[in-house]
Image (cartoon, grey):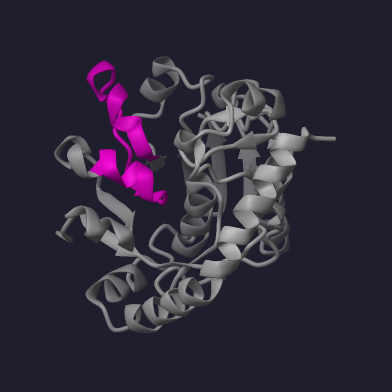
Amino acid sequence: MYSTEFNQYIKQMVRKRRIKWIPMNAQRLIRLFLFQFTADHRRLKKLRNIHQGERCYVIGNGPSLTIEDLDKLEGQTCFAFNRIYEVFPKTKWRPTYYMVLDNNAMVSTAQHLDEIDAKLRILNVMGKLRGIKPDKRTVFFCSYGLYSSKEFKFKKKHISENIARCFSLNNSVACDAIEAAIFMGFREIVLLGVDHNYSKYIDQFGNGFCDPLVQDYGLTNKHEHVSFIHKDALESSYMCYKTYCDAHGIRIVNATRGGKLSVYDRQPLEELL
């Protein structure tokens, strides 16, 4: 199904991860235990059900997202991520909650933190290693999941119902936003700009590509740290949240213009406003 080079690369990555899985999991367990004694844990606890019964918007950074859509959402409760601050000069809209999960995205976040005008910035606790400090508008969360040698075969089965303790393991910050919205008590979660328009795999920087492109790039040192996550594994996360929300009376609707995320019912943004 995939090229010989690609399969060899996967095997190489698996061997490397097998060497690291014991110390990595020990580190994650220690971090999870210690986090419950932090001020961040106590602050996150206060977010439970603060938006009981309300609607929120989860804003992805997909190519379908337009400035016009963001203008329409001014004053609405919104989650947004990563480099969303790049559109701020073009719109008066600002997210209510800004989130970052990925350690690499945290690098640019640390450099542009002053530009991120949000009610609360909810960042992976690893951001502290980037020099980001907690303040009244910045809180850190702990993300927990066992380190696996076969990350590309990840299938999500459970979510965290208490983000003050930890977020469950996700391959997308949009999924973390859904989990946060559930914890905060929202009863309707609208996705916008969540295109899910990947080829076969995405790398650690969020760039989508398929197996032929891997061959074109060549398996060189600059791709040594590529994290291969199968599109199906990411869809399993979205499906896990759908299953949970259906069982708890929470509606997730996809208002993205186009894209390939078919897990949730579609509804145009204009009908929701």
Q: Residue at x 29, y 33 (%)?
A: 94
Q: Is residue 191 magenta?
A: no
Q: Is residue 91 magenta?
A: yes
Q: Is residue 165 left or right of residue 260?
A: left
Which quadrant is the N terminus positioned in? top right
Q: Is residue 99 left or right of residue 181?
A: left
Q: Residue 154's image quarter? A: bottom right
Question: Is any part of residue 97 visible from this angle?
Answer: no
159, above or below 83, in the image: below
Q: Position of residue 21 (x, y in %)?
A: 55, 70
Q: Residue at x 32, y 55 (%)?
A: 123
Closer-to-camera residue (8/172): 8
35, above or below 264, in the image: below
Q: Residue at x 24, y 59 (%)?
A: 129
Q: Residue at x 40, y 29 (%)?
A: 73
Q: Residue 84's image quarter? A: top left
Closer-to-camera residue (161/215): 215
Q: Which residues are magenta?
A: 81-109
Q: Residue 272's image quarter? A: top right
